[in-house]
Amino acid sequence: MEEGLQGKVALVTGASRGIGAAIAKELAEAGAHLALAGRDESTLQETARSMLRGNHALVVKADMADTSDLDRLVGKVVAELGGIDVLVNNAGLMPPARQIYNVDLDEWQTVMNINLRAPWYLSKLVHPHMKARGGGAIVNVSSTSGLHHDIGLGVYGISKAGVVMLTEVCAKEWARDGIRVNGIAPGIINTQLAGSIIDYLKTRNIKPNPMNMYGEPEDIARLVRFLASDESRYMTGSIIRIDGGELL
């Protein structure tokens, strides 16, 4: 693969498994130096060992719901890797399916803190470092649930809709600083997070989309690599669906 991110420093959140781990591997193969963040240090280390360029991976245990952890995370990456060129806000939480009137305040706050506040705060923290390096790229992982309503996924969908608007706001305000901000909206991806949804559809013989297939983490990772690299230099503020035609 062409090394379109050679020498760049990329921070990926939620990098311990699934989509995040696949993104980390893809960016490493493209030549980036990786910082991997998540709550489980042992699984982050597994991701680092599995990467093509695992020797470039900095592992940082961090809770996305704790802003002091996010301050420490960015500070550590800048101190040890010299700066940040790419931020992938991938970490997310999907609570059990329930209608919105059954969501309590604690659940609402937890989902919003991880799915929306963390991407905003991390973007805010990396902005001056990217600006000082002449620009950078931020990729926010939203969801098709942020573009339309799935019954039972209300609080999750609201948080992901917020990520869509966050992407557009930052893209417009930071273009002058050379920082591109794009988002992706995956459909159902074959990960542990979506396991219960996949089981539900399969047991009822329901097609997930017109293509009747589930995406794989690598499908998302390849798109993230494109958005993180100069191959997408004329793109900012875009939200790209990657969903097998689910919303058609």
Image (tube, rainbow, N blue to C red):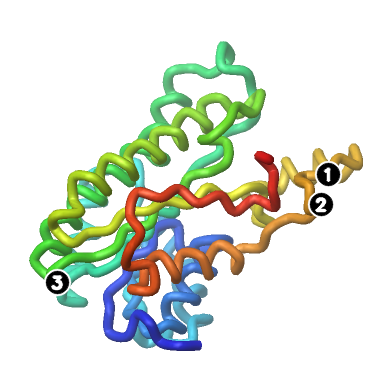
Q: Which residue lies furthest to the front in this view?
A: 234
Q: How far apart are marks 1 and 2 (CA)?
A: 5 Å
Badge 2 element: loop
- Taking depth in this image into account, of 107 and 5 the one nearest to the observer is 5
The residue depicted at 50 percent of the width and 73 percent of the height is: 47
Badge 1 element: loop
Q: Which of marks 3 and 2 is nearer the N terminus?
A: 3
The residue depicted at 40 percent of the width and 87 percent of the height is: 3
The residue depicted at 37 percent of the width and 53 percent of the height is: 182
Q: In this view, does 141 lie above or below 205?
A: below
Please state the horizontal and vertical placement of residue 92, each as a whole percent of the image. Answer: 47, 46
Which residue matches tag 1?
207
1 or 3: mark nearer the eye: 1
| Residue 165 in view in this figure | yes
* Mark 1 touches mark 3? (CB < 8 Å): no
Q: Distance between the residues labelled 3 and 2?
A: 46 Å
- Taking depth in this image into account, of 124 and 55 the one nearest to the observer is 124
Q: Which of marks 1 and 2 is nearer the N terminus?
A: 1
- Taking depth in this image into account, of 111 and 69 the one nearest to the observer is 111
Please state the horizontal and vertical placement of residue 168, each as a whole percent of the image. Answer: 32, 42
Quadrant of res 154 = top right
Which residue matches tag 3?
79
Please state the horizontal and vertical placement of residue 46, each as a whole percent of the image. Answer: 51, 74
Which residue matches tag 2?
212
